[in-house]
Every structure is written in C-alpha cells, then in structure tokens.
Image: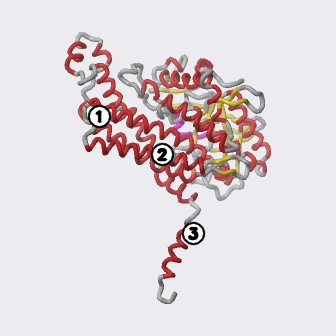
Amino acid sequence: MPIKSGKQYIERIDRQNINIWYKGEPIKGPLSEHPAFQGLIQTQADLYDMQCEASYIEQMTYPSPDTGERVGLSFLPPKNAEDLQKRRLMMELWANRHHGFLGRSPDYMNTAIMSLYTAADILEEHHPKYAENLRNYYKYCREHDITLSHAFIQPYACRMSGQQDAAEDSIAAKVIEINDEGMIISGAFMMATQGATCEEMLVFPTPSTTLSQDVNPSAFAFAVPNDLPGMTFICRESYGATSSYDYPLSARYEEMDTLVIFDRVLVPHDRIFYYGDETYAGRLFGESHFHTHIAHQMAIRYIVKTEFMLGLLESLADEQNVGLEPHMVSNVAKMITFLETFKALRLASEQGASQDPFGYFVPAASPLLASSILFPKFYPEMVEMIQLLGSSGLIMIPSELDFQSDSGPYLNQYLKGSTTEAWERIALFRLAWELGASSFGGRQTQFERFFFGNAQTAAYRMYNHFAQHEQLRSRINDFITKNHPSS
C-alpha cells in the first residue's frame, strides 16, 4: 500500500476500537466526530491529502525500494547530502501547512522510526530476531504510511517505584511474563501526544537500573496498535473548539496528550525490538543518531513557527499604527535575529553532515542541539512580545456569535480599526489571544519548554556531544604557560 490520503487516515482512526476516556466517560463512536479530536484529525487529514496532490507528490514522496510505489519522504534514510535536502524540503512543506504548531506531525515519528532503523545492525549481537523485527517494522510503517505516536516517559510514581530494583510490588513499567505468543507488559506512560489520533504506539522507556538480575524486565522497546486489549488512554481536558474564528489555532491544531495504561498487554514476539539488557537502550538512541535526526525535523518546525510569530507581531503593530516606533522596531529586530539564528543552525547542520558507520548521512549534531536549547528560551520571549503589544486588546474580544447577533452593528461601529473592519481586527486579536492568553497558548509554551527534555537534560546532551573540551582547555594551558617567567 502506498501513501495514504486524508480520507484513508480518518477511516483508519475511526475503525480502531480504542479504549479511551475523556472527562470520566469512555468515548463512543467515531473519534473524528468528537469535539476534542475532530479539528486535529481534519488538519492531519489535510497533510495526508497534500502529499497525494500532483503538485506536491514529487517533493513529498519517493519510490519504495521494495514495491516502487510512492511512500513518504520523511521515511527516507539519507545516504547523501541530496537525500538530506529532499527530507528537509518535504518537512518544510508540512510545517508551513500547520505553521509549526503540530509537535507530532507525522514526519516527526516517521523520522524517529527511520533513525532507529538505521542502527538495527547493533541488535544483531543482542538477538538477530530483534534486528529483523526493527527492520521489518520500519518497512511496515513506510509501506502502509502508518501514523505513529510514542510513549517514553513514565509517571513520577512509576519512576520512584522502579528504584526498588524490579521488586514484585513495583509499579514501574516492566515485562510480567514471556510466553509462546509474546511478552506481557504492565505499566503507565505520560505525555503520549496524539496517542488517540495515531494508529500505532512506539514504546521505548528509559530502563530502571537493576543490580540483582541478569535480565532487566524494565529494559524493552516495542511497537503495537493502540487498540490492543489491556490498553487504556486517559485524556487531559481538551482545548479544542469548533469555531475557527473564535479559536483559530485550537480549532485546528489541538494535539491531545494522554496517559497510556498497559494492563497485562500482550506484545507479539515480532513487535519486540529489544529486551532485557539496558545497555541497548542507550546504544540504540546514540548509534542511530536519534536525537540528531529528530532535532533536524524540530529545527525546521522552529523556523516556520518563528516566522508565524514574527508575522503576527508585525500585523499587530501595523493594526495599531506602531510599526515604526523604536520599541517596536527593536522587538521585531530581535525576533528576526531569533529566526536567522535557527536558519543558520539548520544550514550549519546540513553543511556539516557526515556519513555514519552504517553508511547513512547524518546532520551535524551540535548546531541542532544548540537550536533545541535556544528555542525553549526564545519562545516564551516571543509570546511575551505579543502579550505586551496586544495589551487589553487581548481581553476585550467578542465572539463570532456576537457579530451575528443584534449587537453586531455596535461592534462593527466601535471596534473597527483605522483601515480594517471590526470583524478582521477582532480576528487578529483573537489569534494573538490564543497564543498569548488561552489554555491552548499556555500548553504550547509549556510544551515547547520541555519538548526535547528539560533544560538540564538538553544541557547534558550538548555537553556530552561536544568533542573539543580537552582541546580548548589545552589551548588555555598553552597560553598561560607561554607567559610564565620560566618559559
């Protein structure tokens, strides 16, 4: 099966028998018709339709090496600089369609499974069957255009419980049993963004360290359909809406985050990618360059989202006739500096790309890791610029229904701008409100702050990757030594 259309995506989501709870009630009926999900599902369907359009198909797909049919370019393992550029151009097209607001757009997880596939060889020494499973699963996702999410993070109580060294009463995620059909898993995972609006779930937690067992039951990775018996999804409150005038962002881009419970879920043997040896968790992430490939996709999204923020800031300034005031020029210049910084880091990563031991082309990591440290710091600052510029205009914003009511003529008379009608002016301020003052905007800010781990995790990632620590220390030591009187 080649790339799928938006209609096929919706049909697959609605066909699943997922056990999902929202506000204390199980969701019944097609998920695409539920208010908490319909906007996002329609937006994502639009992305899938886009790759099928004649004007985009050459830029967004490539012939499958197995069947010759068109498959998504974000599945392509890059073998050279041209492949890396093709991937980037494809991901830019999708990012520009959702303006950088979808953290789990399909290309994110396509990139994730692609990166793990490139390092499948290291599993040969662990268990050849696991290597075969990972290669086959990657091909399955590519050939069927599978929509993936992931579950990596365990709740606090589970992480603390995992320190009990796999004791019987530990609630950390672990393998309970292995039988002829597969392994039985129990545990919980947080922040499965788009866990309900995907087809399959990649589960790859950080293992708890065990000192007393040769086989670590908390060390595993697998992928399963998200409607297996024993799987339960519990949703947070939705920020979604139906009116794209009142809620121009959340009506389109609200990605539901879920808590995923595995209660004695049977994972078939052919879906297991490793088990028992925690060293392979670190090796798979490290030798697949997982964080580097993912950060390349992220950098592209950062650029597009910053462009959107810049466009909004300048539009608000123009609407209020302050575009050329010194403080406004200063803020716009600062945001342009943010934008050019991310563009330069993305370009540096591609120009510094090199071949890994498995023959795949990998972007330079340091510029991308730098972008993943900078954007969480810059993003709240950009939001604050919009909040301060919007001022009380972000508070007194009538709704679409107000314009359609008997009071509409008053709004048209008193809320118009110098060059815009009230409808257009309020639409602009509602957009700014969604980013700067709504629940959706608050979640976006928090999401971006911790998208790639907390600040300390990101700092260690950069510190450990940097290869010139000793070289630069030696340079300083040489400089001091040359100035010593005895020299």
Looking at the image, what colour scheme do you see?
secondary structure
The residue where tag 1 is placed is 317
Q: Residue flagged by tag 1: what amino acid is it? A: Ala
Judged from the image, the secondary structure of the residue bearing numbered disc 1 is helix
The residue where tag 2 is placed is 342
Cα distance, mark 3 to mark 2? 27 Å
The residue where tag 3 is placed is 471
Residue sitting farthest toward the top: 406
Residue 38, label in figure: none
392, above or below 368, in the image: above
How packed mark 3 is, by other alpha carbons closer than 10 Å (few <14, some 14-19, many 20 or more), is few
Q: Position of residue 319 (x, y in %)?
A: 28, 29
Q: Residue flagged by tag 2: what amino acid is it? A: Phe
Cα distance, mark 2 to mark 1? 24 Å
Q: Position of residue 125 (x, y in %)?
A: 78, 51
Q: Earlier in the sequence, mark 3 or mark 2?
A: 2
Q: Earlier in the sequence, mark 1 or mark 3?
A: 1
